Image (spheres, helix red, strand yellow):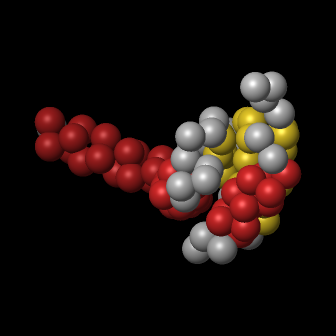
Amino acid sequence: MYQNIRSMVVFLGISMLTNCSVVSDRETLGEYVDDTGVTAKVKTAILNDSVLAPFQIHVETFQGAVQLSGFVETSQQAIKAEQLARKTQGVHTVKNSLIVRSISK
């Protein structure tokens, strides 16, 4: 009897993971995992860039669409961040919402 219950629980768990939208806005588990990987790759590219690394650039990905937000000092830095995101594998589109904030010295 316990084996049947355990089998049913395992079957239901697998069914939920493979057939249901488990993340909001109808993103499947597989898409969510892919988006997490894309976000990590874009963040790594930005952090490895000596010009962009010290700035607060936030990266979010939903179904291959990357959104950049946060602050940079120049429009060239905003463009550079967008270029890095666009050339990252798995990125379909990029929305650049970076704000250029000049810092007075």
Question: In this rendering, would 53 be left or right of 63?
Answer: left
Instruction: Tell me if I can see residue 26 in this picture.
Output: no
| Residue at the extreme front of the image, as rendered | 105
Name the residue located 73 percent from the left edge and 47 percent from the top edge: 68
Total marks drawn?
0
Name the residue located 70 percent from the left edge and 57 percent from the top edge: 81
Question: In this rendering, would 35 be left or right of 74?
Answer: left
Residue 3 on image: x %, y %: 14, 43
Question: In this rendering, would 33 be left or right of 59?
Answer: left
The image shows residue 64, relative to residue 61, as above or below, that is below
Check the picture and name the quadrant holding the N terminus.
Answer: top left
Q: Nearer the viewer, residue 55 or 86?
A: 55
Q: Nearer the viewer, residue 104 or 23?
A: 104
Name the residue located 84 percent from the left edge and 40 percent from the top edge: 100
Check the picture and name the quadrant holding the C terminus.
Answer: top right
Q: Nearer the viewer, residue 103 or 43?
A: 103
| Residue at the extreme top of the image, as rendered | 104
Residue 59 on image: x %, y %: 64, 46
Which quarter of the figure has residue 4?
Answer: top left
Residue 65 on image: x %, y %: 74, 58
Instruction: Tell me if I can see residue 92 in this picture.
Output: yes
Question: In this rendering, would 84 be left or right of 15?
Answer: right
Which quarter of the figure has residue 46?
Answer: bottom right
The image shows residue 45, relative to residue 101, as above or below, that is below
Residue 25 on image: x %, y %: 74, 43
Q: Nearer the viewer, residue 17 or 102?
A: 102
| Residue at the extreme left of the image, as rendered | 2
